[in-house]
Image: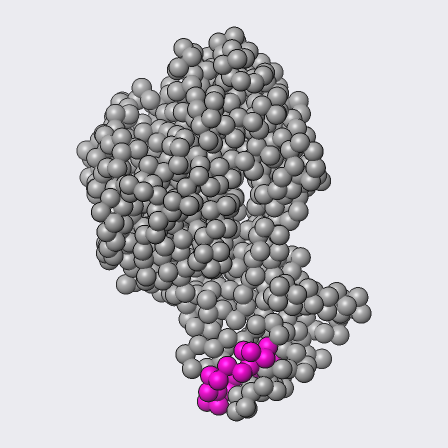
Amino acid sequence: MSKRLIVDPDQCTSCRLCELACSQLAVGAYQPSRSHIQVLIHADDAFFFPLVCIQCEDAACMDACPTEALVRDPDTNAVVVVEENCTECGLCVTACPYGAIRCFDGRAFKCELCGGDPECVKYCSPGALRYESEDSWSPEQRKAYAAQMQDLAEEVLS
Amino acid sequence: MRHAYAGKVLRVDLSQRRIREEPLDAELARAYIGGRGLATKMFCDEVAAGVDPLHLGNKLFLATGPLTGTAAMCGGRYMAVTKGALTGTIACSNCGGNFGPELKYAGYDMVVLEGASGEPVVLVIDDGKVELQPAGKLWGKTVHETEDALHKQLGKNFKIVSIGPAGEKLVRFACIMNDKHRAAGRSGVGAVMGSKKLKAVAVRGTGGITVADPKGFRAAFLDAAEKLKAGDVTGTGLPQFGTAVLVNVINEQGAFPVRNFQQAQFESAEAISGETIAEQILIRKRSCFACPMACGRVTAVKEGPFAGKGEGPEYESLWSLGAAAGVSDLAAVSKANYICNELGLDTITAGSTVACAMELFEEGVIAAEQAGCDLRFGNGAAVVELMSKIGRREGFGDVLAEGGARVAEKFGRPELFMGVKKLEAPAYDPRGVHGMGLQYATSNRGACHVRGYMIAPEILGVPVKMDPHATEGKAAMNIAFQNLTAALDSTGICLFVTFSVGGPEILAHLTAATGFDYDLDEMVQAGERIWNLEKLFNMRAGFGRKDDTLPPRWLSEPIPAGPAKGKTVPLDEMLTEYYQLRGWDEQGQPTKEKLATLGL
């Protein structure tokens, strides 16, 4: 059973260390604008949400991609970018319901789970990010997770 | 430019509306690290010590350190360096939140604000594109309204520092605020910004910061993060209760000042403690940038006359707006704190100034009709009302807007001001914590706790436990803390890490980030250099041994009750030893030999 990057927004304190950890590996600099994970901060409502690709089973980005530049990594279950196939057409960016893919420098960028050892998790002291086996989830956890994603979608769209 | 630094200084002449970039001086950066140190060096080179803080000849530096914006432990700080409007000393107010990192991502280590604009302006920095925009519509608005308006106009990604009405009205203890609730709080740096008619600086940066040794840097962070998590204060106390965890701790030591330092234990401490905050008003925890501890508290008072929401109150504010004024109503204290954040007031000085006025009132020196309200100790509603009035300089608030030293002087009772060099003391009675007395007397910006936090050894036992009622070893420990803190501040990380980590961990971050091959001695010596530089500025500004003293109450009125009953501060013996160990003469003047050693 493959693991999943679990986001528990209730534990998030908006420190953004995940953005720093991610961007250092992604682009070799501490550069939140280029992080695959972005903490949405609506401070007035005390709403903090680390937004990152959830590697959907039925991934809209893969369906939208006309050049087969997005493929499933069989080991980690992550949707990964095949750089040489990507034309930066942006269709995946539009298709993603969560805004978890962006384009820079002629290619799509997204979380690829660091090949199965996500760096952001190591920097998250409060435990808002965890990398866990999916079969360790109870039905309640699955429901709660689904509800959170629904809330997030409403938040992003509103 | 080198790693860790953005490599550029942005210089803005508000009189001439001229905007220039200049390269950061790498040699100076090594000697003064960055942030507090480097900005103070540049400030002292450029500004005459005798300048009126509110004159256009004063300059305001908003400076980051080399670790700001990196994944260093708590590496998100910027510092406002200037000559303080409240104190007339060198000022350096340190602040977290998200502004400092964003400034570096936009390409600048610091912004130097010179001259003064005729009309209100906002400085907008959008990566390399910098311009001054008219801010007439924002003038008069609160900090929160200003941030909301600028976010609407420029976009939500902009990070903003601004002043509220207090800064505009030159309240002598106005702050510079960012992220709505974070304050570069002390010494009146917001009044200096107000005197320049600069309402806000808004910045968006999409660039990045590299470090010289990414692997070493990562290891330094992960090591520190583990230690922070394991530490009592950093892993449990601060995350669980925020800085307010200290209310009960300090009160139990009998060093929690009450009613303008007339007592040192508050009978109602529990009502304004971190534990009570967690029960009654806490909504969630909030971090500054890159902080694993998250001591910030998002809170709300849901109903009643003091309904409101915001962040805090912090430990110091619970004290200054609470115990210092004899107030035990958490809702009133919270409301007063929210108002301070919205108007841009330093909560410590604001509350202490009211406490001073309350004692003057109870002594019959200030009359009720003059104050416009009942100023008896314990009147929370009066504290709330006065925060609004001070922040806008209305009525009696205009008198209090000058700060406690000037208020006590005006009413002929200067001894009732509880501070040093016109800066009100924070929430530790030095009669019960003697090293803190030495710290208050010698700190380069007046009675300040965050330049050499002697509570750590004297109360918390970090790095070693010292007897709070003894003088032995205090001078040496205070100097070590002051030097290390000056270096740490200059790197751009938060002082709170030092509850669990020390010089070696800070050094590991600094060398891996900058590539400078500092050793521990060189890093701490940079701190000593900075401390002496600040001291030299103050001496040129007219401060000397006569000013390195404490209010008569702390020197000669014993604490009336509690664990520290009968104690006063034996300052003279500690101060003499302090000057000797510093390599200063009897008047507190750094000797030529000492300055030569430091390259000053």
Callout count: 0
Residue situated furthest front in the rendering: B137
| Location of residue B304 (image quadrant) | top right
The colour mode here is one colour
Frontmost residue, B587 versus B313: B313
Residue A24 vs B576, above or below: the answer is below
Q: Is residue B397 left or right of residue B334?
A: left
Residue B55 vs A57, above or below: the answer is above
Asked if residue B450 can be seen in this view, the reply is no
Q: Is residue B558 magenta?
A: no
Residue situated furthest right in the rendering: A139
Quadrant containing the C terminus of chain B in the rendered view: top left
Position in image of residue A47 (x %, y %): 62, 56
* Residue at 44 percent of width and 39 percent of height: B140
* Residue at 65 percent of width and 26 percent of height: B328
Position in image of residue B508 (x %, y %): 41, 56
Position in image of residue B295 (x %, y %): 57, 46
Quadrant containing the N terminus of chain B in the rendered view: bottom left
Q: Is residue B290 left or right of residue A149?
A: left
Q: Is residue B564 left or right of residue B8?
A: right
Residue B352 vs B501, above or below: the answer is above
Asked if residue A3 can be seen in this view, the reply is yes
* Residue at 43 percent of width and 65 percent of height: A31
Magenta residues, as a range?
A: A77-96
Frontmost residue, B450 versus B402: B402
* Residue at 61 percent of width and 21 percent of height: B379
